[in-house]
Image (cartoon, rainbow, N blue to C red):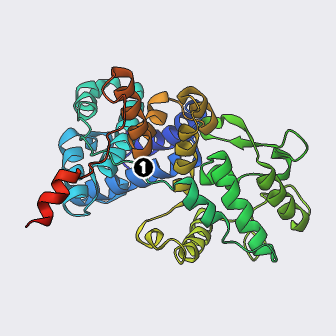
Amino acid sequence: MKRGPTPLLALVQSYFQAHLRGVRGASKHTVRAYRDGLRLFFMFAAKKAGRSISDLGVEDLRADAVLAFLDYLEGTRGNSAGTRNCRLAAVRGLVEHVLRHDPTRADQYRQVLAIPSKRARSRPPTYLEPEEARVLLKQPGSTTTAGDRDRALLLVLYNTGARVSEALAIRPEDIQLQRPCQVRLHGKGGKDRLCPLWAETAEAVRCVLRRSPPGNGPIFRNARGAPLSRDGAAYLLAKHVRSAARTLPLLARRHITPHVLRHSCAVALLQSGVELSVIRDYLGHVSAATTGRYLSTNLQMKRAVLEAFWCRAGLDRKPPRPWQPTPSVLAFLATL
């Protein structure tokens, strides 16, 4: 990339290595998402300018180039508003970092930072009702190594509400199988949390550990003995969802991912009367607002709230009596 008083390549490297990882403590998934977003932007900017990526400089970090890039994402690549906002966040992060090292172009960078995010339609999270989750959890067999692994993984995801990356990172040293049974999950931003384990989950994990090779690597492994990947976990879940759909055909029409089990855990906790602040800590949410969205998605809880409100307001003291025809009405009808 173009050399000068503030080489773009050096700033990009320091942004990822010193700022994202060192200062913010961003997870590898956040780093990967920002990397992919900036790669797309540099490829677009170079093509638009008719130059190679190696010739780009800080002068190419302009608002018009960023706006054209965002239009390209939605118009040509067909990205949603949410994806567009994620790509914009990656560009903004880099521009903020560049501004700290190159204040001479402050006005140019300010125009980029002033580009607003686009309002994205909020979709209610997909989740399984407890009855549906129980059917799914019964699908993995318990007579093979793969069956034990699948059952333990699904139980851990549903029991703890873990992100799939957190579940796949569990090592033997993170698990306590003596009372109180619990697991330590390594969450976003280097934040750990302890989650209790049901007796059923602890027994399933114990079976996995008995068959695990020696060492302190992740306990969930594929058929070749390597750590199970996110794609591998999604594949296994999809297989068991198809099996469960024989009992619950509606499951075949829904897109069930490992994260859906996290949502299912949150909704089940809400239905059990657990306070939002407790669920926030249980799931490792930074903000209670993130947890609060589950309140707006469960119809059963909305009905319970409505019934409690009517009862409190004195509007529904007695259940309506079903209509019954009187003898005179029946006699009249008989004459017709």
Which quarter of the rendering shows the C terminus? bottom left
State the residue at coordinates (81%, 57%).
205
Let me know if residue 298 appears in the view. no
**Residue 49 in which image quadrant:** bottom left
| Foreground residue among 118 and 197 | 197
Q: Is residue 186 left or right of residue 319?
A: right
State the residue at coordinates (57%, 58%).
131
Outermost residue on the top side: it is 313
In the rendered image, residue 219, in percent from the top left (x then y), is placed at: 79, 59
Outermost residue on the left side: it is 336
Q: What is the crowding at mark 1: few (fewer than 14 residues within 10 Å), some, or many (at least 20)? A: some
Vertical relation: 277 (above or below) 329: above
In the rendered image, residue 216, in percent from the top left (x then y), is placed at: 86, 55
Q: Is residue 336 left or right of residue 109?
A: left
State the residue at coordinates (22%, 31%).
111
**Residue 59 in which image quadrant:** top left
Vertical relation: 58 (above or below) 103: below
In the rendered image, residue 199, in percent from the top left (x then y), is placed at: 81, 50
Tell me how many marks there are.
Answer: 1
Vertical relation: 290 (above or below) 231: above
Secondary structure at badge 1 equals loop
State the residue at coordinates (77%, 54%).
201
Q: Is residue 12 left or right of residue 50?
A: right
- The residue singled out by tag 1 in the image is 125
The amino acid on which the numbered mark 1 sits, given as a three-letter code, is: Pro
In the rendered image, residue 40, in percent from the top left (x then y), is placed at: 35, 57
Q: Is residue 210 left or right of residue 17?
A: right
Let me know if residue 296 appears in the view. yes
